[in-house]
Amino acid sequence: MATIDLSVQQNVSVGLFIYVIITYLPVMLITILGNFIVILSVYRKREKTPNSIFISSLAIFDFLTGLIGVPLCMVAFLLRRQFHYMENCAIWYYVPITIFISISVLNLIVITIDRFLAIKYPLRYHVWISTERAFRVCICVDLFGFFFAGSSFAIGAVASLFVPPPNVTYEYDCGSSAIYEMYGAPVSYYVMGPVVGLSILFLFILYAYIFSIASKKAKENATRHGKKVKKREMKVTKTAAIVLLAYTLCTAPSALKIIIKRLIDNGSTWLVWYLWFADFLIIANSMMNPLIYAGRSKVMRKEFKETFDFIICKVSSRSEVKAKYDAEASCSRKSPKIHSVTTSSANLATCLTSTSSASTGESFSADFREN
C-alpha cells in the first residue's frame, strides 16, 4: 500500500474539489428536478393507478437521494482531501443515501411483482391491487427498507455506546470508524450485499418469465384463443424492465469492486479511477428514471411539459404579484399625498356610485309598486 504524506492531506485538493462539483452537482440538480416533476405529475392525475403509486414511491426516494444523500456524499468525498480511495471514509455521511438506494431497490421489486400480476392475471389484477392497497404496500415496503438498510449503521452506533473504542491508529484519518468496521461493516458486506444481489437476479428471472407469458398470450391472441394483453400494460412492463436494467448497469461496477481489487494492483491509477467511477454510477442512477419515463412515453412527456409549464407559471405569477406589490409600496412611500388624493377620489367615486345605485333601485321599486 502506498504511503500517504500527512502534511499534504491537511487541505482539500483543488482537483478533487473540481471533480466533485463538476460531476455530482449536475446529478443532484437533475435528480431533484426530474423526480419532483414525476411526483407532481402523478399528484396532478385525476385517476391514479396502482402502478403510478409505485412509481411515485420510487420517485420520492430518488428525490430524497438528490436532496439529502448527494450533498452529504459530496461532503464525504471532500473529507478524503485527495483522490486516494479509502473504504469506510466518513462513513456516517453515507447513511441517508444507503437507506434511500435500498428502499429504491425494494420499490423496484414491488413494481416488478405488480407487472407480473398485471400480465399474468389481467382480469383479477384490478380486484387484487387497488389504489388504497398500493398505497399501504408502499408504506410497509418503505418502512421495512428503512430498518433493513439502516441496520448496519444502527449496530455500529449501538456498539459504540457499550463497547470501548479499540486502540487503532489510522495512517490517514478521514472520518473512519473502527467500531463500525468491526460490527457494522460485516452486516453490510455479508447480509445486505448478498440480499441485494440475489434480489436483482430474482427480478431478471421474473421479467424473463413475464415476457414469456406476454409472448405466449400474443400468439394465443393471434389464433383467437386466450386473453389479450393490453398494449399499455406491455409498454409499462417494458419501461419497468428498462429501469431495472439501468439500475443493474449502474450498480454492477460497485458489486464488482472486490474482484477488480484482486485483479488490479492496489497502487494503480486505473483502480482509483474505477472506484470513483463506481461510486458515481450508483449515485447517478437516481436521475435515470425520469429520463427513461420521458423517453419511453409520449403521455409522460406531455405530463412533464404540462407540469414544467405549471411550475413556471406559478413561479412567474408569484414574482409578478410580488413585483407589483413592491412597486405600489414604493410609490406610496414616495408620494403619500398623491396616494391619499387618489384614495379619497376612489372613495368619493364609490360613494357616488352607491348613491346613484340606491336612487336607481328606489325609483325602480317605486315604478314597480305603481304598476
Image: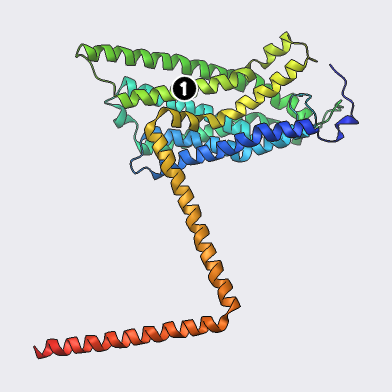
Residue lying at the far top in this picture: please name it: 263
Residue 254 on image: x %, y %: 64, 20
Give, as a three-letter code, the residue at label 1.
Ile
Counting labels gives 1
Residue at the spot 74% in from the left edge and 10% down from the top edge: 264
Image-based side of 293 in relation to 47, left or right: right
Compared with 153, 258 (above or below) is above
Compared with 370, 17 (above or below) is above
Q: Is residue 175 visible?
A: no
Nearest to the observer: residue 365 or residue 208: 365
Residue at the spot 32% in from the left edge and 27% down from the top edge: 232
Query: How was this image coloured?
Result: rainbow
Residue 38 on image: x %, y %: 46, 38
| Residue that label 1 marks | 242
Residue lying at the far left in this picture: please name it: 371
Q: Secondary structure at mark 1?
A: helix
Image-based side of 114 in relation to 60, left or right: left
Instruction: Name the quarter where the N terminus is drawn.
Output: top right
* Corner quadrant of residue 360: bottom left
Residue at the spot 32% in from the left edge and 19% down from the top edge: 120
Q: Residues within 10 Å of mark 1 (few under 14, many from 20)?
A: some
Residue at the spot 50% in from the left edge and 53% down from the top edge: 315
* Corner quadrant of residue 129: top left
Nearest to the observer: residue 293 or residue 121: 293
Instruction: Name the quarter where the C terminus is drawn.
Output: bottom left
Residue 255 on image: x %, y %: 62, 17
Image-based side of 19 in relation to 290, left or right: right
* Corner quadrant of residue 21: top right
Residue 77 on image: x %, y %: 73, 32
Q: Is residue 296 visible?
A: yes
